[in-house]
Amino acid sequence: MELANMKGVGPKSIALLNKLNIYDIEDLLEFYPYRYNIYKPVDLETSEDNTNVTINALIESTPRLSYIKKNFNRLSFKALTNNLLINVTIFNRSFLYKHLSVGKNIMLVGKYNKQKNAFVASELKLGILTEPKIEPIYHIIKGLKNSQISTYIKQALTENKNLTDYIPEEIVGKYNFLSKEEAIKIIHDPKTINQIKQAKIRLIYEEFFIFMLKINYLKNKNKQIEGTKKIFSKEKIKDFINNLPFPLTKDQNIAVEECLRDLKSSKKMNRLLQGDVGSGKTIVAIITMYANSLSGYQSALMAPTEILARQHYETIKSTLDPYQIRVGLLVGSQKKSEHQKLVEQLVNGEIDVLIGTHALISEDVTFKNLGLVITDEQHRFGVNQRGNLQNKGLSPDTIYMSATPIPRTYALTIYQDMDTSVIKTKPNGRKEIKTFVKKESELKDVLLNILEEIKKGHQVYVVAPSILENEERNVRDVNNLKSSFDTAFQNKVSIEVLHGKLATKEKEKIMNRFQTGETKILIATTVIEVGVDVKNATTIVIFNAEMFGLATIHQLRGRVGRNDLDSYCYLISDYDIERLKVLEKSNDGFYISEQDFLMRREGDLFGTKQSGDMVFKIADLKKDFKILLQTKEDTKHYLEQNKELEEKYKKILQSITNVD
Ligand code: ADP
Ligand code: MG
């Protein structure tokens, strides 16, 4: 069934559902609640004071409705609950007034103050609750209420859906898993908490199973691929390195050696280059591309965003130009004619090194002899793209650069199809970024410090989370920050806003003005997270810092401290202070990601929520790590036992590489 055929779903709701990445009934069914409200009636005499509770009650006095202000009203009445007569108040529910009268049974959620004998309700429902009730809560967006999503999903549940179950039968038997259909029903309409647990574990397992199946499959596949032995002059590489404006660090030298060794070998290179922000991965990539050019092959470097692609292009072009290596840029926003010309030059071999976004692997781009592909910020590409790169007719050597230092245990699982080089040391002269956790109420001090920096001629990043609008929590957004900052600085400081929804051209212009120093403060969402390099920026302020993983914040603050100036990072938050303090204490990405891991918080081990297919619908790489390890073993075993794969698995694997 199409979404459009559902009751109560018009074009407007469809547009909203699409925003949540829901395009059909299956998507809707796999749009899982992120938590549940649990209503379980209690006895006020034995329950804790001033905590949120649910009670059944009987109205004992005629409700009174009073208006305090225009949009602010109060309903109050007496009610009996378990022989206790209490005073009930609920705000802004004038619409309930006509439904309430003496003798009616109601259910209330709220807080009770024993001393005042007052119950302030946040929710009131007619009728009594005889059994505990569990209500799923979904991530929502403006215009789409939780109750609407619930209704849509309830409808979808009654449909005959064609959900594929990806857990092999023998494994379902082994763990006694619920069927997919049962699990989906329960997750949206549970009767008990225990049921939720059972359903969740099964759905999590399935997501990880698919994920690890891909990785194990790629791993096997990679072993079979023959690479090309690249031949280049060692002397020329040495000269190239000696002519760089700086000496390589010890770890950079090792990484270069490892990459070049792979280039020379007949085995296809499949290497993860891990290194903290600012550790200098790019130059390792450039040297490897230089060697690849010397051996007569083309190289390609893919960046996750156009801004980054352009930045890489500038750096790489200026480094390689003196060596007569022709560097090209290919991004989505280019003119058709420009694009066309580039595509021709590539086929003819008139370009040696191509820099671009993922437009680079689009269908119409064919290389003459692609020998090396490098992707920057690996976590933005994910497992699905790992295979695609190998599909360009040739099987180029591949390097994945990642600025997310992930714990070894993870690397061994989710990157087990690759070899790894790690850059741990940072280039000399790099200073620690002084980091401070501040409350919203301390903002004034932070603003004063910002002003100091600007007076010194430095620049400032301000970051706000960009999330699905959340009704439960007040979160700063870029536009509201812009007006607060304008007011605070009396419009005397040039401030601009950058976020993902702006047109590419617009983004570029804004980035350019920041790069040239025309703009002093750049207020942005996490689009600035990866790689952006403005050396004059010395301060970064992150609002609602509690909403980010430590690893993400660490990456974000890597935007500053890019030269020998003192640099500062302010984390503004009223919550989760202890966790954030890890960042005050340490500037070591590996340590931080270990801590992030140990705390096992839900969320973003690998940076932002939008990070490609490292994002799961229900599974959490951190919280559900044990299940991940189990699927690692199970998928390996499964692939060994099933040489001929079932059609449904072939389909999944087809999307990452050609299955024979
Ligand atoms: P990342 O690993 O975050 O991608 P980059 O490759 O962008 O880091 O390097 C960060 C900055 O450090 C760049 O400006 C680069 O030129 C500089 N850099 C890299 N290696 C060295 C080095 N060995 N000595 C001094 N500066 C270096
Ligand atoms: Mg980089």
Image (cartoon, rainbow, N blue to C red):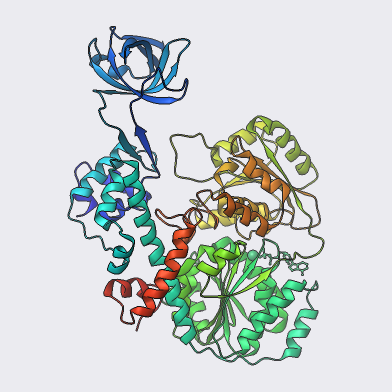
Q: Is residue 156 above or below residue 238?
A: above
Q: Position of 94 compared to 423: left or right? A: left
Q: Is residue 145 visible?
A: no
Using the rendered view, name the quadrant where residue 240 is placed.
bottom right
Q: Position of 39 compared to 371: left or right? A: left
Instruction: Give coordinates of residue 353: x percent, y percent.
Output: 59, 79
Is 157 in front, or is 391? 157
Q: Is residue 217 above or below residue 378?
A: below
Is 383 in front, or is 481? 383
Q: What residue is at 40 percent from the left and 16 percent from the top?
A: 119
Quadrant containing the N terminus in the rendered view: bottom left
Is 33 in front, or is 134? 134
Instruction: Give coordinates of residue 422: x percent, y percent.
Output: 66, 70
Q: Is residue 206 above or below residue 284?
A: above
Numbered circles on residues, count: 0
Quadrant assignment for ligand 1: bottom right
Q: What residue is at 32 percent from the left and 53 percent from the top?
A: 30
Q: Position of 162 compared to 326: left or right? A: left
Instruction: Give coordinates of residue 232: x percent, y percent.
Output: 67, 91
Instruction: Give coordinates of residue 435: x percent, y percent.
Output: 72, 45
Q: Position of 98 compared to 529: left or right? A: left
Q: Is residue 86 above or below residue 273?
A: above
Quadrant containing the C terminus in the rendered view: bottom left
Q: What residue is at 47 percent from the left and 59 percent from the top?
A: 626
Q: Is residue 603 visible?
A: yes
